[in-house]
Amino acid sequence: MKVTLITGASSGIGEAFARRLAAEKHDLVLVARNEKKLHEMCDELMLKHQIMAHYVVLDLTDTEAVNKLSEETTRHGFEVDWLINNAGFGSMGDFVDLDIDKELNMIELNISSLVALTHQYLPAMRSRKRGTIINISSGASFQPIPFMATYAATKAFVSSFSEAVAEENRPYGITITALCPGATTTNFFAAADIRDPLQVKGLQTAEEVVETGLKAVRNGRTKKVSGFANYIGALLGTFSPTWLSSRVIARALRPKFQGKE
Ligand SMILES: NC(=O)c1ccc[n+]([C@@H]2O[C@H](COP(=O)([O-])OP(=O)(O)OC[C@H]3O[C@@H](n4cnc5c(N)ncnc54)[C@H](OP(=O)(O)O)[C@@H]3O)[C@@H](O)[C@H]2O)c1
């Protein structure tokens, strides 16, 4: 059975992908740690859309997580036709003050699990000459971000990795897209313990991000920023020298995190 596997499907952008693709009759495999939420979602989506929805409760930062997921999909005879690497989290603060275990855990989730899952499911997509991978990057990927240093660097990795692998797989009929949302109304800021996130205005909804992502896939885009204002921000980040954009961001955030100019 062909399935769409979504990581981080228990809330926010991952949940919005699951709801939208269920309505488009995709059969789903949903992955996250919150079993109650995944169970409820699968029951609801199966009933509402007459699809198959299976969930796997996993902490994707566990060393055995990707093997376990692969065993589970093989055991059920699922062909992962779409892979949405969405699970991720961030942190904000003066790097020296941040919990190093949490920073390293972020690298495990945002980078290592995404790379490992892509590597796990690509070979079968290649032999089928069909497949779609959406890797959730961020507007934070376009420039270094002082006081969000690790998170921005993980997302720079995601975009660079995705665009490179997308070109490697273009001849095999596989679409790989790095989707770059800007600030979006999800649980992200609470999970990252970020209050008052840069006073960002005009946050997008998760549904708007999903809409942009699906359009990008249809158009075969390898990278897509969600939202016009975020696109302008990404252009500024791309074309400004990194020393300048970093300096400007550091100036804006220094009073909050270091209490001095
Ligand atoms: N919201 C924004 O402003 C924004 C902007 C740009 C990019 N993004 C990116 O969008 C993606 C989705 O985030 P979101 O905004 O939708 O935030 P969210 O509502 O906090 O969702 C994060 C998802 O990741 C899952 N997750 C977290 N740690 C996990 C782990 N160790 N193992 C398995 N699953 C885990 C969470 O589920 P459980 O807790 O149940 O495990 C949840 O389903 C992330 O990659 C984020 O970096 C978000």
Image (cartoon, rainbow, N blue to C red):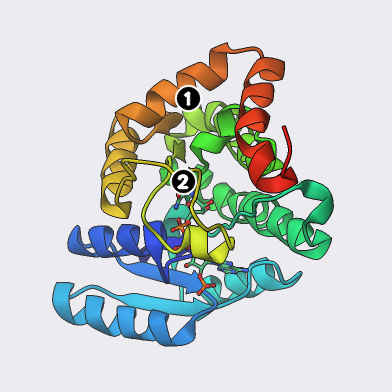
In the image shown, does 102 or 20 lie closer to the viewer?
A: 102
The residue pinned by badge 2 equals 133
In the image shown, does 107 or 131 lie closer to the viewer?
A: 107
In the image shown, does 13 or 71 lie closer to the viewer?
A: 13
**Circle number at residue 234:** 1
Q: Is mark 1 within 8 Å of ligand 1?
A: no
Circle 2 crowding by C-alpha within 10 Å: few under 14, some 14–19, many from 20: many
Q: Which residue appears at 62% of the width and 23% of the height?
A: 248
Q: Is residue 168 visible?
A: no
Hey, which quadrant is residue 200 in on the image?
Answer: top left
| Helix, strand or loop under label 1 | helix
In the image shown, does 76 or 97 lie closer to the viewer?
A: 97
The amino acid pointed to by label 1 is Ala
* Percent position of residue 152, x then y: 64, 40
Single out the mark in the foreground, 2 or 1: 1
Q: Quadrant of the C terminus?
A: top right
Q: Which residue appears at 30% of the width and 42% of the height?
A: 214
The amino acid pointed to by label 2 is Ile
Q: Is residue 178 visible?
A: yes
Q: Which residue appears at 64% of the width and 54% of the height?
A: 91
Hey, which quadrant is residue 144 in on the image?
Answer: top right
| Helix, strand or loop under label 2 | strand
Image position of 222 with respect to 39: above or below = above
